Image (cartoon, rainbow, N blue to C red):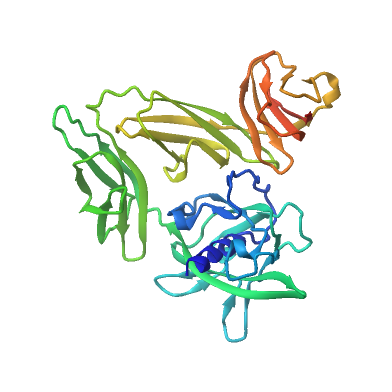
Amino acid sequence: MKNMRKLALVFWALGMLISMQGFSQCVIDHDFGDLTFGVSPDPAAGETFLDGMLGVDYYDVLHILIPTTAADIDTTFPPTLPVDSVVVLPNTVDGDGVYSGVVFTDTLTNEEFFADEIGLEWIYNNNGDSGNPMGFLGGEQYCGSLQGVPTRSGIYRIRIDVLGWATIFSPFNAPYSFENFTLRINCPLIDDVEIVNANSVTGVDGQLTVVLSEGVLATEIAWFNQYGVQIGTGETVTVDNPGTFAVQVTTEDCVSMFNGWVVIDEGLDCVLTATVEVSPAVTGISLGSAVLTVGNESGAVSATWYSANNLIVGTGLQLNGMAPGTYSVVVSDDSGCTVEITDIVVDEVSSIQSVEAGQNVLFPNPCMDSFRINVQTTAFVEIRAMNGSVVFKGTVLPGEAVDMTHVAPGVYLASWQSGELWEQAKLMVAQ
């Protein structure tokens, strides 16, 4: 069963890479470390796609590392059996009304849908490796973005129908169907949650109060802590221990869960600091990103990012796939100290200007240990390998060297912003 669960993860991830056009592709840049296959987010690790909101722009990215051999997925296969490719079945409904492909089933009504029928679509990036837009090769990394404006709320169970191809004397395929994943699309039932922070010095408990949207009549309101344990019901709940909380609102028509409400202990002597560096979105090329730098932390650090609509859009010290707009981030450490950064603005620039590297813009080029960019003001710099992975991101002062000692020899794409325009040029790293 363990190996089958591994196989399920791989084919679930592949199923997410359905062919849809009309938006810039996601960037293949996730670090899987020493894994021979994997996905991010990883459902086996408790990770999931972000919740969506009815009528609000949605975007999330799935990264997938395809195994080279079938034995990496299931040890019952011969250790030398290579994975040729995996192909997602097209979305179809037969004469008996049976859905196949990637099917979203409403867990309350048991109705079945395809992604476009609930306002979503998948934008894939298979790196041009396969002539079949639904095909993905073994031993390679890919990504896909789920995006759109959800038109139907609900909690959906997802079934992925795929064919895995391998060769023993002659090519053969094996069909698989998996149903272990869900997607939640919330209704806009609340306007806000009012927070009263705790204070361990004065003995004040925290408090959370949900503000329902105009006209919403809740039949039930339940509160949960960060471990999923229910801590109370009703519009207001008292919080004995600071942390991150969620509220579930039920009406006659919809059940929605809203996460990420933080209660802090103001009695703590906190010195935690945090700053954010933002990379803008480039029209028709890429979405924006932000990198968080934390200081004076105590123990492990967690970070949760929010959109202007107070929807959680990601976690961790770096957030990619940011559409133009305003964001915020809440940073916490093991001591309970919390820092919130608001009004994080992701701008959109109209284009990237390609610069001939021979114009003394990058020097030396080729480089070995470091190189410099000929800029007059501080520049935001990003270096990517040809597979899209980021090898450097940060600000660079005029005349400052960019360290490349950790980078393997090869061809890279250097992009930088100094002023209003983004520029880019190829960079050669020699041995």
The vertical placement of 317 against 232, above or below, is above
Residue 291 visible in image: yes
Q: Name the image quarter holding residue 360.
A: top right
Q: State whether residue 358 is above or below residue 407.
A: above
Q: Which residue sits at x=24%, y=28%?
A: 266
Q: Nearer the viewer, residue 427 or 146?
A: 427
From the top left corner, tell me how far across and down residue 409 is, in percent: 75, 33
Q: Is residue 14 left or right of residue 239?
A: right
Give coordinates of residue 32: x percent, y percent. 58, 47
Q: Based on the displayed image, in which of its 4 quarters is residue 333 positioned?
A: top left
Compared to 68, does 395 lie above or below? above
**Residue drawn 62% across the image and 86% down it:** 95
Q: Locate residue 430 relative to residue 52 in the image: left or right.
A: right
**Where the C terminus falls, by quadrant?**
top right
Tell me what residue is drawn at x 50 percent, y 50 percent: 56
Q: Outermost residue, bottom direction?
A: 96
Q: Observer-nearest residue: 167 or 149?
A: 167
Percent position of residue 115, x then y = 57, 64
Closer to the camera in the image, 367 or 134: 367
Residue 401 horizontal/vertical position (percent): 68, 17
Q: Residue furthest front?
A: 79
